């Protein structure tokens, strides 16, 4: 399971990017990157990113399927 993220400024991450990437890849520790105190990005392992993308795809498909199942036919009014 993923450990809680490390939070670092973009300046600090620049100084040791290789270490940040290694932490994400080897130790499965994400790093949240801040700019002026605001969270703006994250470094995660490629495995975590791919799992998220797969989940997102499934979730979108689930929502679409649900809407199709509950969709009611539009009432048509005839105009002559």
Image (tube, rainbow, N blue to C red):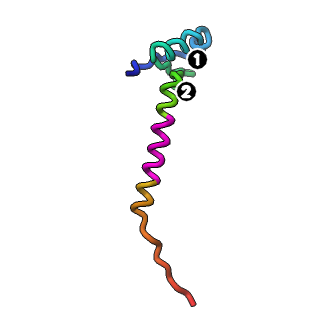
Alpha-carbon span between mark 1 and mark 2:
9 Å
Residue at (57% x, 22% y) in the render: 35
Q: Is residue 58 magenta?
A: yes
Image location (x, y in percent) of residue 61: 47, 48
Image location (x, y in percent) of residue 18: 59, 10
Label 1: state its secondary structure.
helix
Image location (x, y in percent) of residue 66: 41, 55
39 up-or-down from 23: above or below: below
| Magenta: main secondary structure | helix
74 up-or-down from 15: above or below: below
* Residue 61 vs residue 79, the one in the foreground: 61
Label 2: state its secondary structure.
strand
**Which image quarter: residue 72?**
bottom left
Quadrant where the C terminus lies? bottom right
For the image, the number of numbered tags is 2
Residue at (47% x, 72% y) in the render: 74
């Amino acid at each position: 399971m993923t450990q809680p993220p490390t939070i670092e400024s973009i300046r600090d991450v620049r100084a040791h990017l290789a270490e940040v990437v290694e932490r994400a890849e080897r130790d499965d520790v994400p790093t949240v990157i801040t700019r002026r105190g605001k969270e703006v990005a994250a470094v995660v392992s490629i495995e975590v990113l791919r799992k998220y993308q797969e989940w997102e795809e499934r979730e979108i498909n689930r929502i679409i399927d649900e809407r199709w199942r509950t969709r009611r036919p539009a009432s048509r009014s005839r105009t002559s």
